[in-house]
Image: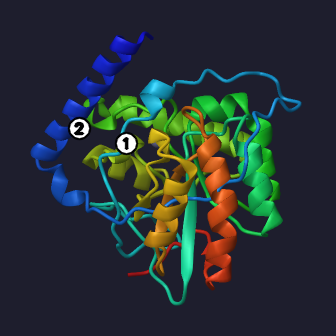
Amino acid sequence: MKKDQLFTRRRALLAGAAAVGAAGTAGLLLTGSPEDTPARSAAPAAGPRARQPALKPSAYRLRPLAGNAGTPLATPGRTPVRHEPFLRMSGRGRTMVLTFDDGPDPRYTPHILDTLAEYDVRATFFVCGEMADWNRDLLSRMADEGHVVGNHTWSHPLLTRMTRSGIRSEMERTSDVIENAYGERPRWFRAPYGAWNRAAFQLGAEMGMEPLAWTVDTDDWETPGTRSIVRTVEDGAAPGVVVLSHDAGGDRTQSVRALRAYLPHLLDSGYHLTLPRRQYT
Ligand code: ZN
């Protein structure tokens, strides 16, 4: 896509997002604090898997519409229909959740996994089905190393502009790929751009998934600089915070490097990086 076309597309999507908010969904989309995931220096990883996924940076990297918020959670057997996503995790102590969206991308995700492994930390990856389909080995690695994989739809569309059957297809196909490559169906989902609607909540619950947004947005998709990302995460650090970062959708070198910097700082500060937990209200 040419630059002007990208710009137009982005503006159109953002306008749509604004319309969504104006239409009354805004009440569901609480805002949170910004935060991020650390990364380490990322040299493009050619790696064994040279297949290049069809990246869609322009489509992926629009500013999320929603922030964060916290709400109580699910029951073991049956997943309730939520009216808003969880923006943070409840619980005791200095625990935080790191999340990485839009991947996996063989150029960046392996570096993030390496850093997490180095510090023995688990994270959550909200993958897109079309990326996961091209990089199944990375989902296998996530499973092997104890990370959680969530559903971020197949092609990262704006769900608020889709039919219910279209949304169902985006979510189901993605859960199928995750099940095949990761070993089990996802229990969490996150709407692209943070644009949730009733159908997404209902279908997610039907598929046994809880909606998870975030508390701190690193804005790493805007490539604000590694230091900026690190600062956002460290300034936003607090108990229960869920950090949003990206391991795909564009050049994520800064995200990788930032993780490398802030992760040891968070650990030194006494934070325990953990996985999202289904909770009772
Ligand atoms: Zn996304």
Q: Nearer the viewer, residue 81 or 273?
A: 273
Q: Nearer the viewer, residue 176 or 219?
A: 219
Asked where in the image residue 103 lies, by quadrant, the reply is top right
Mark identifier at residue 17 = 2
Q: Is residue 262 something one can see in this rendering?
A: yes
What's the coloring here?
rainbow
Q: Is residue 224 left or right of residue 257?
A: left
- Give the image location of residue 117, x and y in percent: 80, 62
Circle 1 — which element?
helix
Q: Amino acid at mark 2?
A: Ala
Image quarter of the C terminus: bottom left
Question: In the image, what residue occupies the spot 27% across and 37% down?
Answer: 160
Question: In the image, what residue occupies the spot 67% across and 51% down?
Answer: 257
Q: Is residue 134 above or below residue 27?
A: above
- Other residues around mark 2 within 10 Å, as few (<14) / some (14–19) / many (≥20): many
Q: Amino acid at mark 1?
A: Tyr
Asked if disc 1 is less than 8 Å from ligand 1, the answer is yes
Q: Is residue 219 above or below residue 262?
A: above
Mark identifier at residue 193 = 1
Contact between labelled residues 2 and 1, with CB atoms less than 8 Å apart: yes
